[in-house]
Amino acid sequence: MSNAPTNNPIIKISHISKDFGAVNAVDDVSFEIMPNEFFALLGPSGCGKTTLLRLIAGLESPTHGTISIDGENMDAIPANRRPVNMVFQSYAVFPHMTVYNNVAYGLKVAKICQSDIRQRVIEAIDSVQMGEYVNRRPDELSGGQRQRVALARALVKRPKVLLLDEPLSALDAKLRKAMQLELMQLQRKVGITFIIVTHDQDEALSMADRIAVMDRGVVRQIATPNVIYESPTTRFVADFIGKVNLIDAHVIARNKGKLLVDVKGLGTMEIFHKNNTPDSVTIALRPEKIVASKRKPQTKDRISTKGRVHEQVYYGNISHLYVNTEAGLRLLINIQNASRSTVDLFGIDDDIWLSFYPSDAIIITN
């Protein structure tokens, strides 16, 4: 992934809100996006992410707030004059036109001279590896190829920002993974800012330089993928990004950036946490941080508990075990199927020991 440079933002969103009648789709959102950054708007359906993208594009007008692109206030700038282009979920390529004419269409409308059109179209088509398909029509192309045509058509106008609204959702799982890699490579190649809207956590984590997690019109956290996953700041973010065990806990003592907490069903543990916290908190524990064993762990630096396997779900490279502990918790753990024999290591109703390092537990306060 590209590293966002530390210069002026290409997009500045300041206290943006958008109401549709009584529905507050976007609620007082403010953040900045840097040049050459691959930025993701992530959240469940109805969280406001597509509305926010349409506000940037100029397809919707904000109820309150301002959006600036490359230092220019967009309040009075219509969609067709903004230095952005958008790739829609449906691709919206013209079925009666060849690949070449699809990509050239926007330049012809803008009355660009014919020689410049040809050069720019060929460059755009080559950038998405569609050079051998210039004379084909969309019904002669695969879903992934049509997606590339839509990307070339957006890039040919040389926007400062490319907006992507769920661009891969119509593709099958294998092609979707391949296109994720292609989009990352394309973004580095063309050197412009990409903003992608997605509800797929894996997609955002694997592609983006930074992620804004949205919930009910509000941005809950903005950070790099590893920070979003390893250090979520809210219960919603922890629960929405990947799998997680959320356990009630109570703070017993605070001392120089450490908290001594009593965790329901797991006893007391000391966890690093710099921020102020209420007495009642939540412990978030990712399933891959928990180690399963047949025997009780002998190491004193790990928290351990005994349980029984309630359910097992096989996913090929990993298995999910749902374990009921003796203290009444139900914990999800991941078993990496690193060898063929690992698959049958634990079965339903097997007794099992679980252990983890306190440093892998995350304290969440809201």
Image (cartoon, rainbow, N blue to C red):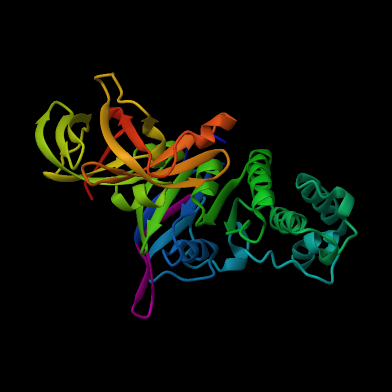
Magenta stretch, overall SS: strand
Measured as percent of width and height from the top left, residue 111 is found at 78, 65
In depth, the one of 286 and 259 nearer the eye is 286
Q: Which residues are magenta?
A: 10-27
Q: Residue furthest bottom?
A: 21
Residue 342 horizontal side relative to residue 113, left or right: left
Residue 343 in view in this figure: yes
Residue 243 horizontal side relative to residue 298, left or right: right
Measured as percent of width and height from the top left, residue 22 is found at 33, 79
Measured as percent of width and height from the top left, residue 37 is found at 53, 42
Instruction: Tell me the quarter of the picture where residue 91 sits.
Output: bottom right
Q: Is residue 107 magenta?
A: no
Number of labels in the image equals 0
Residue 4 in view in this figure: no
In depth, the one of 99 and 274 nearer the eye is 274
Q: Residue furthest left?
A: 253
Q: Quadrant of the N terminus?
A: top right
Residue that appears at 50% across and 57% down: 199
In the rendered view, would you say 208 is above or below 54? above
In depth, the one of 146 and 82 nearer the eye is 146
In the rendered view, would you say 135 is above or below 304? below
In the rendered view, would you say 9 is above or below 303? below
In the rendered view, would you say 168 is above or below 96? above
In depth, the one of 178 and 245 nearer the eye is 245
Residue that appears at 37% across and 80% down: 21
Q: Is residue 26 magenta?
A: yes
Measured as percent of width and height from the top left, residue 193 is found at 57, 47
